[in-house]
Amino acid sequence: MAKTHWHAVASIDVGSNALRMLIAQLTKHGKIEVLEDLSRPTNIGRDTFSLGRLQAETIVQVNEGLGGFAKLMKEYRVKKYRAVTTSGIREARNCDQVLELVRLRTGLEVEVINNAEERFLTYKAIRGHLPDYLRVRQEGVVIVDIGSGGVEISVYKQGHLQYSEYIKVGSLRLSELLSDLERTTPEFPSIMEEYIESKTYLLEPRLRETGISNFIGLGGEIKTLHFLCEEITGQNEGKFISRKTFDDLVGSIRRLTKEQLADRYNLVPERAAILLPSAIIFNRFLLMTEAAGIHTPMVSLRHGLIEDMVDNLFNTQRKHDFLLDIVSAARYIGKRYGYDAEHAAQVEKLAVAVFDQTRRLHKMGSRERFYLQIAAILHDIGKFVNLNQHHVHSSHLIRSLDIMGFSSRELNIIAVTALYHSEEMPEAPPDGFNEMSKRDRLTVSKLAAMLMLADALDISHKQKIQALDIGPEGKQLLFRVSAIDDIALEEWTFNAKSSFFAEMLGIKPILKRKGG
């Protein structure tokens, strides 16, 4: 029987080619001591990417593996865990049935996360596992995270996240998609390179013009590639692979079949099959940068899940830094769609002020405040599509975006909140509204009421309101503003939008200018 540890926690990654679990002990200071790190191979990705659904044999395989994990968690008396699954099960047509069977057979609740959540969690683990991470981030870095189903590319410059993209060219997906070609041509590596280039060429100008000088590799068999580089050179470069060493490795494995790779480097067939796609993808992006090589922090989703637990239990500085990354990414999206940055910043400031000064009325928390902040930044991006009905286009665009750290449910909350900012109220419930839970519908309605008034207070886009103080006066809620210039238009718009706020928060808002 394993020993019981203070704050034993577990993270489970139901991945496309393996089930992985990390059990760790957390000290009272938030330090992590790994107790178990386990992996079990599966055929999840092979089924989904080639057949579109998990077969019965694979479902049994998954339940047996996760059942073993659940037993070990009981031995360690793990009270807190998080189990997630990504593209392998997420894209399967029988996703819901599979996860329900997992719950019934193992007792484990497995959460489906999107690409943005996966990236957010994995990046959390980098900070504690890569020397000079803050310096690298300040200088400028591209992070390339290759999963079985797709590749995530994120660019940081001067310490801030600039943008992120997701492309469906994951290692296992490529192997399955191009398997017929592999059997018919000796030039398969070149064909794979052409295919990858056809999916990534639009990113090349953006990466080159940024002048990125650092490169971090995640997932995508980076651990195996790192080991093979050390085998070839006979040198240990730490958590780094030089550009020349990696180029030599790619040249070497391009000439080998999967069977030859497995035999020469003592790899299991499943790993050998996805090694070349991973190497080619990494090399494709490395060539778009000025980096001297690849940093290899050797972290994955399961490490990030544990780090996220630490952040939430101990309210770390990293937690707040990552929230700033999300805000930075939202502003970059706004720029991409030609938003009015000064207006967006003013609406963001006013919306957050309304939220903070009416907490006793709405009783929502910090996460809801964050939804409002992002909705305020992005509320006008639909004007890029059409000035008419721009609020509808804003909502559609937000729902389609891949914003780091937000689940699909949360993006829907932000999208519908942004939809309601306009004076043109939808007559019928908007897309995504009826599918929400009752609690989420109420959250959206209260946030939208606040965003409406914040937008009204800068309807001229001239940032006239300098300060806002909110407080009750009798049966009304007084919005006292300090302003420059005439605010007749703002007052008229505020009054036109005030009834929805009164309906949602139970008190009528009244605008009053200080000093007159």
Image (cartoon, rainbow, N blue to C red):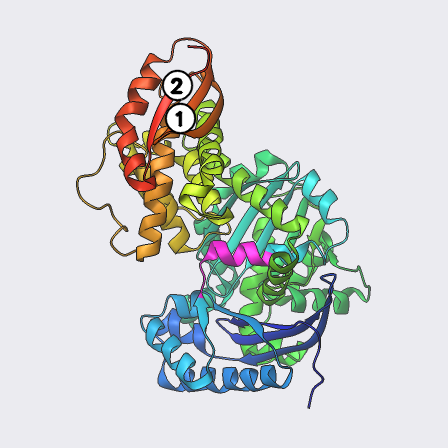
Rendering quarter of residue 248: bottom right
Mark 1 is surrounded, within 10 Å at the Cα level, by few (under 14), some (14 to 19) or many (20 or more) other residues, namely some
Local secondary structure at mark 1: strand
Q: Which residue shows up at 61% across the image and 77% down it? A: 78
Q: Is residue 141 above or below residue 387?
A: below
State the image coordinates of residue 65 (x, y, percent, origin top left): 52, 84
State the image coordinates of residue 455 (x, y, percent, origin top left): 37, 27
281 and 5: which is toward the camera: 5
Disc with the residue nearer the chain's start (1 vs 2): 1
Give amino acid for label 1.
Leu
Residue 102 within the magenta-colored segment of the rendering = no
State the image coordinates of residue 409 (x, y, percent, origin top left): 38, 55
214 and 110: which is toward the camera: 110
Local secondary structure at mark 2: strand
Residue 113 within the magenta-colored segment of the rendering = yes
Residue designated by label 1:
478
Q: Is residue 357 above or below residue 134?
A: above
Give amino acid for label 2.
Lys
Residue designated by label 2:
512
The dot on residue 130 is none
Q: Is residue 294 left or right of residue 355?
A: right
| Magenta residues, start to end | 112-122
Rendering quarter of residue 448: top left
Rendering quarter of residue 217: bottom right
Mark 2 is surrounded, within 10 Å at the Cα level, by few (under 14), some (14 to 19) or many (20 or more) other residues, namely some
State the image coordinates of residue 415 (x, y, percent, origin top left): 35, 44
Q: Which residue shows up at 80% across the image and 59% down it? A: 237
Q: Which residue shows up at 36% across the image and 85% down it? A: 56
Q: Is residue 272 above or below residue 335?
A: below
Q: Are marks 1 and 2 in contact (CB under 8 Å)?
A: yes
